[in-house]
């Protein structure tokens, strides 16, 4: 018995130390027996301030009638889910949700026990969830009037890019999860929306949620919903999984999702059920999940940002979007596309960009990818007042300094491995110079040979050697 008694004591102590709820126990004289860590944090007091004393000494604002602990003790009754707002010792106004129980043996009062939850932070959490969900739904409604992107919005003829479009179109036929990896501005959102619009789900909701910049608790509530609980003070609210039912849910920047939330997401994906926070019911869901990452998934796993098991679950279908600098042949097409697009919006009649602008655009490395290109065209079209051609002077000084770096040949980053020998480095550099030059000359071999000041035959030999054209 003694042994068991010791064990129970250890269990109790461990429990009290580690639970989030505050626990306060008084004896039949109103003196504090237990006052755990969570309670200390909640009320801003130290257990030493209370132990062995009448609890009312520590709470001058309370008396035997208003104190829930005293009520439970004196009236031998439970007080459940009672909100209490008071100033704690640090002068902070806090609201707690309390349940208080009398402790009795053979109808003799031994004391009372109170369990408190911090409602101040919970309430602000739920208020935030409520505001964010309203905004999301407003967004979704606005979008319903606009149209979502579809594959016709995706411009390009680069072979890698076209392969990814094929994969995406195929994926639209089924509901397997898709993981889209691409750096900023490469078109992840356009791909995700296009998969939705091309699928049978096109008339059902498409909801996008960015997973970064949201604390775990908040995102969890937004995704899975909340349920009015006996203790949490939460209200009934469906999460995005329920709201997107029948449609598509885009989890943007999954690599930024809090790592502790990832197993919960994995469970929902595996089981096909979602359970609201504080809820007991498993709600079946039928949602197509598309996730995006702006860093390489292998790197995200290595850095501990993405759980490997979640990665495998998400990447049933993988789409990797090329950087704009690796699809330079698409730059003239994109320029034309965006000029047409903004001609319509701005009621202008621009025809094309000057040769100088096109050349500079082809050489530039485009860290912001297609978004950056689109923005530059938009900005320049605001400036063109007369004529039909976008010229260098129509770009801001900032853009000019970045993009128009005279005519010096500029070699973009080449991924050299650390221990690579000189010969291999020279090989890669020459390959890159020739690729860039070919892109600048739109694949015209004679023009390119002239530009590089080598014989046409020599260039042809090198093009084959580097696999730039087929043998
Ligand atoms: N292939 C394309 N053809 C035409 N426009 C494109 C193409 N890809 C992207 N865009 C345009 O480029 C802009 C950026 O695309 P999007 O928002 O899909 O990029 P993202 O990869 O989601 O970027 P981020 O990681 O910064 O969110 C959008 O305005 C989109 O319309
Ligand atoms: Mg995006």
Image: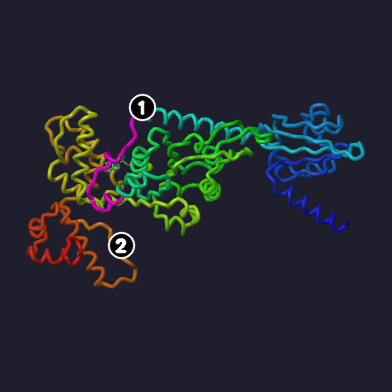
Q: Which residues are magenta?
A: 144-164
Circle 2 packing at 10 Å, graded few (<14), some (14-19), many (20+), is few
- Do the numbered discs 1 and 2 sit on residues whose CB atoms are within 8 Å? no
The residue at 49%/52% (across/down) is: 310
For the residue pair 377 and 5, the one nearer the viewer reads as 5
In front here: 167 or 413? Answer: 167
Residue 446 spot, x, y in % from top left? 7, 58
Q: Is 44 drawn above or below residue 464 in the view shown?
A: above
Number of residues whose C-alpha sits closer than 10 Å to that of mark 1, classed few (under 14), some (14–19) or many (20 or more): few
Q: Which quadrant: the C terminus? A: bottom left
Q: Nearer the viewer, residue 391 or 142?
A: 142
Residue drawn at (37%, 44%), measured in percent from left and top?
A: 173
Residue located at (89% from left, 36% from top):
109
> Residue 415 shows which numbered tag?
2
Q: How far is disc 1 from disc 2 in space, using C-alphas?
A: 45 Å
Residue topped by disc 1 = 145
In the figure, is residue 2 to the left or right of 256? right
């Amino acid at each position: 018995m003694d042994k068991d008694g010791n064990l129970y004591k250890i269990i109790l102590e461990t429990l009290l130390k580690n639970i989030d709820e505050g626990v306060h126990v008084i004896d039949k004289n109103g003196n504090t027996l237990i006052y755990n860590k969570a309670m200390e944090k909640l009320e801003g007091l130290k257990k030493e301030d209370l132990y062995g004393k009448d609890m009312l000494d520590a709470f001058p604002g309370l008396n035997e009638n208003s104190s829930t602990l005293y009520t439970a003790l004196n009236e031998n009754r439970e007080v459940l889910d009672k909100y209490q707002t008071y100033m704690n010792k640090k002068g902070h106004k806090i609201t707690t949700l309390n349940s208080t129980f009398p402790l009795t043996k053979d109808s003799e009062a031994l004391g009372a026990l109170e369990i408190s939850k911090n409602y101040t932070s919970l309430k602000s959490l739920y208020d935030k969830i409520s505001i964010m969900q309203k905004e999301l739904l407003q967004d979704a409604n606005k979008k319903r009037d606009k149209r979502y992107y579809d594959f016709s919005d995706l411009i390009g003829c680069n072979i890698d890019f076209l392969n990814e479009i094929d994969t995406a179109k195929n994926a639209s036929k089924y509901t397997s999860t898709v993981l889209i990896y691409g750096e900023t501005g490469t078109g992840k959102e356009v791909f995700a929306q296009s998969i939705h619009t091309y699928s049978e789900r096109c008339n059902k909701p498409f909801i996008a949620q960015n997973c970064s910049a949201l604390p775990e608790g908040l995102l969890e509530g937004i995704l899975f919903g909340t349920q009015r609980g006996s203790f949490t003070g939460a209200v009934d609210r469906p999460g995005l999984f329920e709201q997107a039912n029948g449609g598509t849910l885009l989890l943007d920047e999954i690599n930024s999702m809090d790592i502790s939330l990832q197993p919960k997401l994995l469970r929902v994906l595996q089981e096909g059920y979602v359970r609201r926070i504080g809820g007991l019911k498993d709600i079946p869901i039928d949602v197509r999940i598309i996730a995006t990452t702006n860093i390489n998934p292998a790197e995200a796993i290595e850095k501990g940002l993405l759980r490997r098991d979640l990665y495998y679950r998400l990447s049933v279908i993988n789409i990797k979007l090329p950087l704009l600098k690796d699809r330079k042949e698409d730059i003239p097409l994109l320029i034309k596309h965006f000029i047409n697009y903004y001609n319509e919006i701005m009621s202008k009649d621009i025809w094309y960009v000057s040769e100088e602008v096109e050349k500079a655009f082809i050489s530039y490395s485009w860290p912001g990818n297609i978004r950056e290109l689109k923005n530059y065209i938009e900005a320049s079209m605001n400036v063109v007042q007369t004529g039909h051609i976008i010229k260098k002077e129509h770009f801001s000084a900032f853009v000019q300094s970045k993009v128009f770096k005279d005519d010096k040949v500029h070699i973009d980053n080449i991924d050299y491995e650390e221990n690579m020998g000189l010969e291999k480095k020279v090989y890669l550099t020459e390959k890159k110079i020739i690729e860039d030059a070919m892109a600048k000359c739109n694949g015209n071999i004679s023009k390119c040979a002239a530009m590089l000041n080598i014989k046409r035959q020599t260039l042809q030999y090198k093009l084959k050697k580097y696999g730039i054209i087929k043998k």
